[in-house]
Image (cartoon, rainbow, N blue to C red):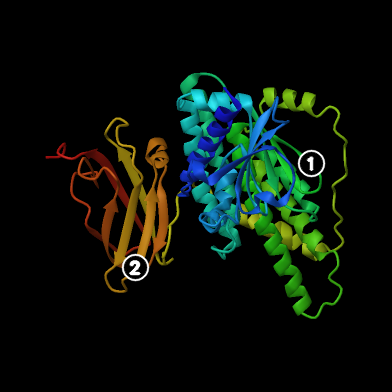
Amino acid sequence: MTHKEYANAAIDIVIDLAAEQGLKYRRGDFRVEGVAVNNGSFLRLNTVSFVGGNKEPTGISVILPFGHERVGKKLKACKDNFYNYKYCRVLDVGIFFGFSLAEIEIQSAREEETERSMIEIVIKKVQKILSLADPSKNPSEAEALSASLMAQKLLAKYNIDIATVTGEEKQEEIEQVIADVGTGKKWKYNLANIIATSYCCKCFYQGTEMIVFYGYSSDVLIARRVFMYLFRVGNSLATKYVKARRDGGEWNTGGLYNSFCKGFCDGINKELQKNCTALVLVTPQKVVESFDEYSKDFKKLDHDIDMNDREAYIEGKIEGKRALNAQYITEAHPTSNTEIGDCRLTFSVVDKTNGIFADEISITLVNLETTVECNYTVSKFDYLFGLTVGGDVKQGKYNIALNFPSKGTFIVQNADGTAITSFTADSTEHTFNWIIVRDGDNK
């Protein structure tokens, strides 16, 4: 491939990844600049640079800045979604992609592989679960932290299923992905080690801002996602705790933040390790051996933090344990405008099309008295692996509407063959048993 072909291939990869997030870029939006340098020229331009020089480059870097006139604001709004991609880093000024020339050649030549598709399904499922952990959208710290345990159980489910189908361990490349968390907050190193161990990978640090997760692609991508959310939630909880103590008249609050975070990490670690033991989750030997060789010349640094307030430590530990014990069943949650109430709903969907149906199913419930709308989503992953979707609503009578792209070719109906129209939530629990069939098979 020529230099121009490498650059265009890298641009196409980035355009495709951005399109998955609903962002529309064109080749004309990118400027090829030559040697990659650290300057401010990329603050408004989508910049493509050759890593290692123009004559014999070793890779291609692409930067999508948040200052881009047409797409920048939308890009910034969905920046966390890019943690799902091994090639990229989320920085303060934009999204950075780094590709080796070999990666570009492979990415350009290969077709979608079955195992890669499975990895992407797992990651998208985890992304939906962890959207609950965004402090700006979800005030429930308990729900946010329990999402990480659900993600871990999904990872375990994926490992088990692949081993069952293929009769062997996962065959993936060992990757490195970077989590940029800024300077300070020394407890982040402890949290990173806990998450890496719990999600079957390794981690190390570059400078004071970057945490690097090292392991199989599916493991490190999920580990980075879980780490970033838990770091944000832990930071938010600790900050609120210190403020509450200060507002209560305590003037010397030095050390409270670190004490709380130390307890927070210990509480999470205790619960995640119990899950690892129960699910027999261990870092693959190939990853361990590769990392030992890779890190043999690394310096060992002490990242331990002091605990000088017992009360703050205990509060942090309780928060971690309480949150991670809050939910053990893998499920999707209402997507918006959901009113939590008196009746627990469980949606169980069985595919009767032998895998031909592959749509995401949107469920809308409307309370006929209050007009409150509740929205749920059943993904391909859910009915593929027999997972249930659940939520809570107020008691009352509801109309039900289902939407999916191939409506007209396939239908979703009750297991007894009757149509899905409405139901009355008049008890503490209500279970829906639905099946997917070709339209006409039930006639």
Above or below, 30 relative to 260: above
Q: Is residue 365 left or right of residue 234?
A: left
| Total numbered badges shown on the rendered structure | 2
Q: Picture coordinates of residue 97 (x, y %)?
A: 62, 40
Query: Residue visible at 30% across and 65% down?
Result: 366
Q: Amino acid at mark 2?
A: Gln
Which mark is first along the chain, 2 or 1?
Answer: 1
Q: Picture coordinates of residue 415 (x, y %)?
A: 24, 43
In three-dimensional space, the C-alpha distance between marks 1 and 2, rounded to whole angstroms, equals: 53 Å
Picture quarter with the C terminus: top left
Q: Picture coordinates of residue 204 (x, y %)?
A: 77, 38
Q: Is residue 209 left or right of residue 442?
A: right
Q: Amino acid at mark 1?
A: Gln
Q: Nearer the viewer, residue 56 or 243?
A: 56
Q: Is residue 59 left or right of residue 7?
A: right
Query: Residue visible at 79% across and 41% down?
Result: 206
Which quadrant holds residue 207? top right
Q: Nearer the viewer, residue 326 or 79?
A: 79
Query: Could you tell me if the residues under marks 1 and 2 are in contact, i.e. CB atoms within 8 Å?
Result: no
Whether residue 324 can be seen here: yes
Q: Residue furthest left?
A: 443
Disc 1 crowd, CA 10 A, few/some/many (<14, 14-19, 20+) = few
Above or below, 298 relative to 136: above
Nearer to us: label 1 or label 2: 1
Q: Residue furthest bottom?
A: 249
Which residue lies under the disc numbered 1? 206
Whether residue 275 can be seen here: no
Q: Picture coordinates of residue 325 (x, y %)?
A: 60, 52
Which dot marks residue 395? 2
Disc 2 crowd, CA 10 A, few/some/many (<14, 14-19, 20+) = some
